Amino acid sequence: MSLLLKTLKDELMILKDSHLFRYLNRVDSEQSSRISIGGREYISLCSNNYLGLATHTGLKESSMEAIKNYGNSAVASRLVSGNMELHERLEEVTAEFKGTEAALVFNTGYMANAGTLQALADERDVLFSDALNHASIIDGCRLSGAKIFVYRHRNVDHLRSLLSMAAGSGYRRKIVITDGVFSMDGDIAPLPDIAGVAEEHDAFLIVDDAHATGVLGKNGKGSLEFFGLTRRDIIQMGTYSKALGSFGAYIAGPAEVRDYLINKARAFIYTTALPPSVIAASIAAIRILQEDHEMLSRLWQNTMLFREGLMGLGFNTLNSETPIIPILIGDDKGVLQFSKRLFEEGIYAVPIRPPTVPEGGCRIRTTVTASHTPSDIEFCIGIFEKVGRELKVI
Ligand SMILES: Cc1ncc(COP(=O)(O)O)c(C=O)c1O
């Protein structure tokens, strides 16, 4: 065996021995609240399909229509010949939905964060990032080459003291970046305070609304709507792939930011544009969300029902305030066992382990959707109680 393969094999062995090996499960059905794995049906508690739109007929029909009219592929990057009427329409629809001057579509949320941070910041700049921000933000910060300060999770005083410390150091740009909804904890960033501190220090604010788009706010517009924030200068990133049931991501904000990213964001420039079918589904999803308010209220009813049920049983759901409801287990072996028992009982909810969460913070990360029925939720609470007692978690 070559030296390379031997070193890979050794490292994989270490991951297996420490219960941190990751493997792929295969879903054989469409992605709804019930999925089929290995010929058996499970209730899925781990998708980001918050509104159930991934299987919505309106999205499917829009995609098929776009394929008929425009074909399968955008065939080139946006700056070459891949910029189609659909891409620009999605950007207009997104800006209108978010109430911003402009929007720019990226192929994924990972690329939107990495590309935006790489474009806006370099060695002359300084970034302030929440300790629990998504990996794509961490990677984007590193990619930029800027000085990085990590502030304690949701701790505005710590952020303020770091901004004060950096004041007068001659940085060109200061950028504060935070998840709107934190993907592993389900809590919400204190945006009005963060925006206030950022403004005091003349810093840009970027909010990652991947899990807030279609979820937070009266109309599902995201974190800013939730808090009633209307500042023009805040840059909002969001995804079409979670609550909106499609694929891709956006940056919404001032028109200058859009123009700047088109010119500077390598993750935007050097990649083939998203295909017409995907873009058409995203447009349809926003339109459906604007017309159908039922989905959002069902999502929140289910969220309350599930979280209150789990908390009533004595599970630790951390500070979850959204449809992302973590159930803290602690150690890696325990969380694997918990997830395995849920699976045997008909629930698919994966274990989350380091490095995604801190050491000792292993959890089952559950997500509730609008397409779960109240009886699905009651069933899940019953199984969590059974498994929780059996494994002495409660
Ligand atoms: C907070 C957050 N930001 C960004 C992303 C990346 O989005 P995408 O899956 O579209 O790459 C995700 C999800 O994976 C996320 O949870």
Image (spheres, rainbow, N blue to C red):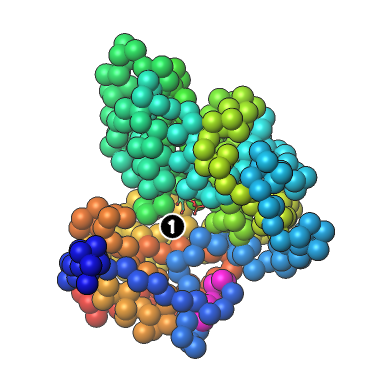
Q: Residues within 10 Å of mark 1 (few under 14, many from 20)?
A: many
Identify the amino acid type marked 1: Ile
Q: In the picture, which quadrant includes the C terminus?
A: bottom left
Which residue is denoted by mark 1 in the rendering? Answer: 324
Q: Is mark 1 on a helix, strand or loop?
A: strand
Q: Identify which residue is drawn at 81% across, 63% down.
A: 68
Which residue is depicted at the point 36% across and 17% down? Answer: 171
| Front in this rendered view, residue 183 or 267 | 267
Q: Residue 197: give x, y in percent of width and height.
A: 40, 23
Q: Which residue is drawn at 30% across and 30% down?
A: 149
Percent x, y for residue 24?
A: 40, 72
Question: Which residue sits at x=69%, y=52%?
Answer: 74
- Left/right of residue 204 with respect to residue 387 in the rendered view: right
As drawn, the residue found furthest toward the bottom would be 39
48 w.r.t. 383: above or below:
above
The magenta stretch spans residue 33: yes
Residue 276 x, y percent position in the rendering: 71, 55
Please tell me whether residue 35 belongs to the stretch shown in magenta: yes
Ligand 1 has an atom within 8 Å of the beta carbon of the residue at disc 1: no
Give the answer, above or below, for where 348 lies relative to 169: below
* Left or right: 10, with 264 as reference point: left
> Can residue 269 be seen in this snapshot?
yes
State the extent of the magenta-drawn residues as a range: 31-36
Q: Looking at the picture, does residue 301 appear above or below residue 80?
A: below
